[in-house]
Every structure is written in C-alpha cells, then in structure tokens.
Image (tube, rainbow, N blue to C red):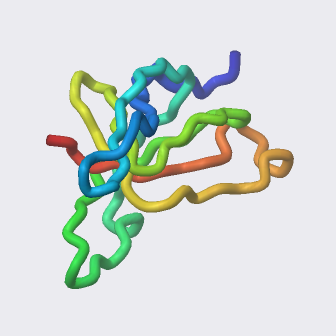
Amino acid sequence: MGLIQGITVKLYERVQSGIDEFYCPVYEESPVDVENVLVTPVSVTDIPEPNATEQKKAVYKIAIPKGDAHTWEDSRVDFFGQSWKVIGHAEEGIEELIPLDWNRKYMVERYG
C-alpha cells in the first residue's frame, strides 16, 4: 500500500433500458462500488470560466484509479454521505507515464 489511499465511492452507471413514446432513451442506474478514488476540493483556479448557458459549479475533483473501465461522464456518484454528479469531460494522462495509481480526473457538482 502506498502513502496515498483513496476512498470507496458508489458510482451509478447509466444503462439504457428502452425508449419512451418520444423515441428518447430511458436509462436505469446500476450502482457499483469503486475503490481507491481520490477526492479533493476544487480550487478557484481549477474551475473553468462558465459561459452564459452553463451554470454548473464544481465542488470536488475526483481521481479515478488506473485500469478502471466504468463510464463516469454524466453519472451520479455518492461519497461523504451525499450524492454528486460528474460534470464535464475527463482530464486524462498516459497511464504508463504517471507514477501514482490514478490517471483520470473529473469534477463533480452537488446532485439534487
């Protein structure tokens, strides 16, 4: 075990279960525990400048362990006793060139 250790979070992966009467996809959430996820507060310099149509406010940044194959974008994730929504796209580095256990980062906002 290294000096840095993440926490276990519950990720709700979205799985398309059908379509509605307007031919839009309908999704179900499938919960899965993901271990060793780093969670850190977002600093002011990490938050991108919002445009007029985007009013999302990132609160935490989460780092995903190398080799994780789950779909995180636009998913709900639970940690610290609260629900959060993954916003934006991943910041990802080349797995082999990063010395620690994490190579992908997402920002999350408060859900609900």
The image shows residue 5, relative to residue 101, as above or below, that is above
Q: Which residue is the extreme one toward the right?
A: 96
* Residue that appears at 24% across and 60% down: 57
> Would residue 59 be found to the left or right of residue 92 on screen?
left
Determine the image quadrant of residue 100: top right
> Looking at the picture, how far across and down is residue 21, in whole percent?
24, 50
- Of residues 24 and 44, the one drawn nearer to the viewer in this rendering: 24
Count of numbered marks: 0
Quadrant where the C terminus is found in the figure: top left
Up-down: is 81 above or below 97?
above
Q: Residue at the spot x=65%, y=35% of the render? A: 69
Q: Is residue 8 left or right of residue 76?
A: right
- Where in the figure is residue 36, as x and y percent of width and height? 56, 24
Is 111 left, or right, of 37 in this rendering? left
In the rendered view, would you say 93 is above or below 62?
A: below
Q: Is residue 60 visible?
A: no
- Residue at 35 percent of width and 59 percent of height: 43
Q: Where residue 87 appears, x then y in whole percent?
A: 37, 55
| Residue 38 in the image, given as x and y percentages of width and height | 50, 34
Residue sticking out furthest to the bottom = 52
Q: Considering only vertical position in the picture, is 39 above or below 1?
A: below
Indicate the quadrant containing the N terminus: top left, top right, bottom left or bottom right.
top right
Residue 36 visible to the viewer = yes
Farthest residue to the front: give it.
21
Q: At 36% across and 38% down in the image, what residue appears?
A: 27
